[in-house]
């Protein structure tokens, strides 16, 4: 991460702008949403305690304080993934992020909430991300 941001700095014109967006190292919430209400059923956990995302956060702080960039703005925001078929999502999660998982208790709550929900209910994964607006400093 640090190496990539240093390399990007060399590619930017002086005063050039870089927008960095990455997920926060926190377990996302799992909700069942139906008829305008959300039922919180659990979280997606990570065997590595979100180690990679924690390293990314630390690297970004290192770059932001290195003197190569000025942090013009930083925000944390939520974005959602909506899922009709949680089994497919769970399979994708296992294949894509093998360290991430859902506890059997949370899965049972999810299944019960979906079984009791009306037509049109969906599973919503509530992720948090950080966006930084970085301005390259000349000659660094």
Image (cartoon, rainbow, N blue to C red):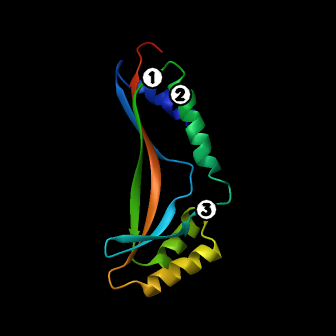
- Residue that badge 3 annotates: 45
| Point 53% across, 73% down: residue | 90
Whether residue 1 sits left or right of residue 39 in the image: it is right
Note whether 114 is above or below 135 in the view shown: below
Can see residue 107? yes
Can see residue 3? no
Residue 43 x %, y %: 56, 64
Disc marking residue 108: none
- Dot 1, how many residues are within 10 Å of its Cα: few (below 14), some (14-19), or many (20+)? many
Please report whichever mark, 2 or 1, sits nearer to the chain's N-terminal start. Answer: 2
| Point 54% across, 21% down: residue | 66
Q: In the structure shown, which secondary structural element does the residue marked by tag 1 occupy?
A: strand
**Image quadrant of residue 56?**
top right
- Residue that badge 2 annotates: 63
**50, 137: nearer the viewer:** 50
**Image quadrant of residue 10?**
top left
| Point 47% across, 45% down: residue | 22
Q: In the structure shown, which secondary structural element does the residue marked by tag 3 occupy?
A: strand
Distance CA(mark 2)–CA(mark 3): 28 Å
Residue 127 x %, y %: 46, 56
Specify the farthest residue to the right.
Answer: 47
**Image quadrant of residue 125?**
bottom left
Q: In the structure shown, which secondary structural element does the residue marked by tag 2 occupy?
A: helix
Please report whichever mark, 2 or 3, sits nearer to the chain's N-terminal start. Answer: 3
Residue 16 x %, y %: 34, 24
Distance CA(mark 2)–CA(mark 1): 7 Å
């Amino acid at each position: 991460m640090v190496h990539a941001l240093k390399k990007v700095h060399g590619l930017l014109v002086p005063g050039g702008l870089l927008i960095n967006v990455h997920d926060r190292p926190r377990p996302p919430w799992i909700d069942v949403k139906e008829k305008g209400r959300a039922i919180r059923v659990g979280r997606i956990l990570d065997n590595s305690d979100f180690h990679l995302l924690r390293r990314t956060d630390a690297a970004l702080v290192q770059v932001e304080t290195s003197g190569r960039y000025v942090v013009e703005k930083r925000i944390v925001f939520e974005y959602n993934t909506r899922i009709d078929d949680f089994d497919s999502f769970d399979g994708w999660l296992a294949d894509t992020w093998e360290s991430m998982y859902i506890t059997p208790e949370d899965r049972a709550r999810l299944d019960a909430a979906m079984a009791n929900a009306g037509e049109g209910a969906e599973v919503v994964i509530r992720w948090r991300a950080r966006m930084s607006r970085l301005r390259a400093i000349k000659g660094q």
